[in-house]
């Protein structure tokens, strides 16, 4: 019995001695002694934390609802070429489907004939708490009448800028817009200003609600 106890003490002592020598050996090999962490330290926890921080988008509302997603948006003009439009005749100049991407790009499909140009590409940035600025740069439709092949050059272009605020529940946004249509020589063709309203598209949205 005594021999067995002595053997156990010898093994235990050897293990303790080996563990005491590890930091010294690491130091001699040029390794940091802090490599060994307390038992409560989890190697994946720190890595996950830093990776998550690196992937966060500082321009989105990570502490609240996000603008990212698909939206149904209407644009209602209040002025044309600087002149007020009677409130009884405010025209809806666009009824669109809009997708805001997390990389701060945006695409809009307008309810107008494709040959007239019904897609608009844009970029956005966050300007405040649930507040955003959008810059669209669409081409207008091609000149098919004077093209023998039926495919001509763009007839013009436009720029649409928006300032919008996301609702607290993240299901709607509203704001103002300016639309400037340009001739091919860069001169202004027409300018509209007005208001816009967006409703989030979900998996339960029915198409008739878009009219």
Image: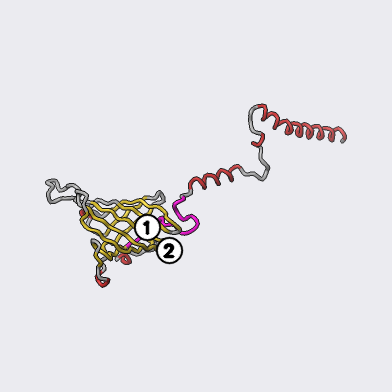
Q: Relative to 168, is 116 on the left or the right?
A: left
- Residue 119 in the image: x percent, y percent? 28, 53
Q: Position of residue 57 (x, y in %)?
A: 46, 50
Give the residue drawn at x 66%, y 40%. 37
For image coordinates 73% across by 30% down, the residue present is 21
Question: What kind of secondary structure does the magenta stretch mostly adopt?
Answer: loop
Q: How many marks?
A: 2
State the residue at coordinates (40%, 48%): 103
Quadrant position of residue 201: bottom left
Q: CA distance from mark 2 to mark 1?
A: 15 Å
**Residue 158 pos. (x, y %):** 25, 53
Task: Say which residue appears at 84% left-offset and 35% top-offset.
Answer: 5
Range of the magenta residues?
Answer: 58-73
Q: Is 204 covered by the magenta stretch?
A: no
Q: Nearer the viewer, residue 10 or 199?
A: 199
Tell me: residue 169, above or below residue 123: below
As for residue 64 lying within the magenta part, the answer is: yes
Specify few, some or many for label 1: CA neighbours under 10 Å numbering under 14, 14-19, or 20 or more. some
Mark carried by residue 163: none
Q: Kindly indicate the quadrant of the structure image that contains residue 197.
A: bottom left
Which quadrant of the rendered structure holds the N terminus? top right
Q: Residue 168 at x, y = what percent?
A: 45, 64
Looking at the image, residue 153 sits to the left or right of residue 203; the answer is left
Q: Residue furthest front?
A: 82
Judging by the rendered image, the residue that carries numbered circle 2 is 167
Disc 2: CA contacts within 10 A as few (<14), some (14-19) or many (>=20): some
**Which residue matches tag 1?**
70
| Mark 2 or 1, nearer chain start | 1
Label 2 SS: loop
What residue occupies the far right of the structure in this picture?
A: 2
């Amino acid at each position: 019995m005594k021999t067995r106890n002595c053997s156990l003490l010898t093994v235990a002592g050897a293990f303790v001695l080996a563990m005491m020598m590890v930091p010294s050996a690491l130091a001699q090999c040029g390794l940091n002694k802090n490599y060994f962490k307390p038992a409560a330290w989890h190697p994946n926890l720190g890595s996950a934390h830093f990776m998550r921080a690196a992937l966060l988008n500082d321009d989105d509302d990570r502490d609240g609802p996000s603008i990212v997603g698909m939206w149904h948006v209407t644009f209602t003009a209040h002025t044309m070429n600087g002149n007020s439009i009677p409130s009884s005749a405010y025209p809806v100049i666009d009824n669109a489907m809009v997708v805001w991407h997390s990389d701060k790009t945006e695409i809009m499909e307008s309810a107008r004939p494709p040959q007239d140009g019904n897609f608009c590409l844009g970029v956005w940035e966050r300007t405040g708490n649930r507040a955003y600025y959008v810059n669209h740069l669409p081409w207008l439709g091609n000149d098919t009448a004077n093209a023998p092949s039926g495919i001509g050059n763009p007839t013009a272009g436009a720029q649409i800028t928006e300032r919008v605020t996301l609702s607290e529940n993240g299901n709607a946004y509203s704001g103002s817009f300016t639309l400037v249509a340009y001739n091919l020589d860069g001169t202004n063709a027409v300018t509209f200003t007005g208001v816009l309203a967006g409703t989030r598209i979900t998996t339960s949205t029915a198409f008739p609600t878009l009219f």
